[in-house]
Image: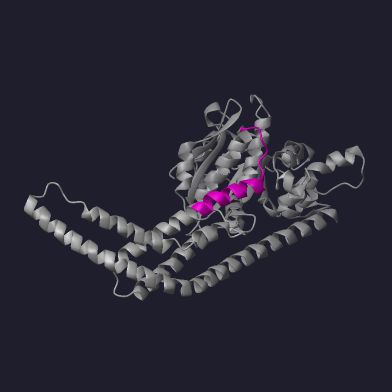
Amino acid sequence: MKAPVCLVENRRNRLHVSPEALRLLSDIRQPVVVVSIVGPYRTGKSYLMNKLAGKNSGFPLGSIEEAETKGIWMWCVPHPDRPNQTLVLLDTEGLGYPEKGSPENDAWIFALAVLLSSTLIYNSVGTIDQIALDKLHFVTELSELIKAKSSSTTGDTDDSSEFVSFFPNFVWSVRDFTLQLQRDGKSITEDEYLKHALKLKKGDSKKEQAFNLTRQCIQLFFPTRKCFVFDCPTKSRKLPYLEKMVDNQLEPEFVEQAKKFCHHIYETSGEKTLPGGHIVTGNLLAKLVETYVDTISSGKIPCLENTVLALVEIENRAAMKESVARYAQLMEKSVELPTETPQELVDVHKKYEEEALKKFMARAFKDDKRQFQDEFMAGKFLKEFLQSKENIRKTILQSDLSLQKKEKEIADAKMKAKAKELEDEVPKQKQEMWQQKFEDQKQSYEMTLQKLMEKMEEERKQMKEEQEKMIQRKLKVTL
């Protein structure tokens, strides 16, 4: 993409997905690393995202709050350090803009950024004080805006403790920071500064609970937290021309801070994944965006479990269709009926059936009950291939009316002879082939079962790691 496009439009306080943006995203078959930025309006969010894209301009500076640019804007660029991944940058409209008709839209924009991201950047100006944390109150509303599991499954309306298993990394970007990073007369790091700012007060009074609420949610929901502080990039009178300025025209401290920030985001932001460890491609991310926005627009609360189940159905059926098409393509190129022996046909079939299975397993996910795998391995491949050949034979037998009578008779005779040869040979091959197929079926299913068990074990391992992370996070917050 040469320039950003609007992914989610915010028109008349309703969210709409851009079909053109979805099409562009769907064409990306690589794994995606999704980095979103949120924060109050006019805090320099777009400038940082342009830096991550390796550009000075792209996302419009200072105009994201205008009516025609509300919502979430997307820029897909090659990952600078990983050739086989795409970096998806999501720039959101400014939170808290006074001319907005409904503050509820801010909450949904924030929730979408959290749901879609590998890394979430919160951008603010000044110090991290109570006022700054009050502006981040959206984090306390996430348990009302997002569900990890359907209530019918959990029997509990609050499942926010599950958020840590799928929430993104959290980076707080503090802009125009003018204080010294010190505490008790000693220099401290940016991360130590954030840790101290998020420290909880002891006590159970309403005052302490109000003070702790946002801090507790940040600690509980986000698995990793990082802080960067930035000096002002240039003198205030030059800020309107910021996107036209090169590094040697900016404050050296800011340039160095921006380089460290970009390096950290590139290095630590992982591929976007779903619970169980399934890696999200651009195509799958497009489906996530569409599903979440449709759910929000219908007045419902996005549920990760339900969304994943819907994607399982879509993706696994697509995987089946893609793999069957590949099998048919390979067989069409390699097999000419009748083959010399039935075993020759069976051997070629087994080879390409295994290749089709590998293709299916590479894309399919969370098929714990083997629903899609059983459909995939129902023994229809070879039968359907032979049936297609039978249909071709029948087509050949239809004479061309444009031929002269004598030529037509000759052609008919040749076609009928060929058809008779096929009719005599194919049934014999079918009988011998299916006898051999019966003996090979056990081997084929054992291979399928082994690959399924390996995939299920991988998903179990990932789920176990996620649960251990969640338990450790709960213990850390409690302590």
Magenta stretch: includes residue 303: yes
Q: How is the image coloured?
A: one colour
Q: Specify the quadrant that holds the C terminus.
A: bottom right
Q: Is residue 402 left or right of residue 114?
A: left
Q: Relative to the observer, which residue lies in front, 209 or 328?
A: 328
Residue 87 appears in view: no
> Where's residue 283, x and y in %?
50, 49
Q: What residue is drawn where x is 92% and y is 40%? A: 205
Q: Could you say which quadrant of the image residue 449 lies in?
A: bottom right
Residue 393 appears in view: yes
> Where's residue 267, x and y in %?
59, 58
Q: Could you say which quadrant of the image residue 335 lies in?
A: bottom left
- Report the magenta stretch's main SS: helix
Q: What residue is drawn where x is 40% and y is 62%? A: 383
> Where's residue 456, x and y in %?
62, 64
Magenta stretch: includes residue 307: yes
Q: Is residue 202 left or right of residue 469?
A: right
Q: Is residue 374 left or right of residue 397?
A: right
Q: Is residue 45 above or below residue 182?
A: above
> Where's residue 107, x and y in %?
68, 35
The region drawn magenta spans: 298-317
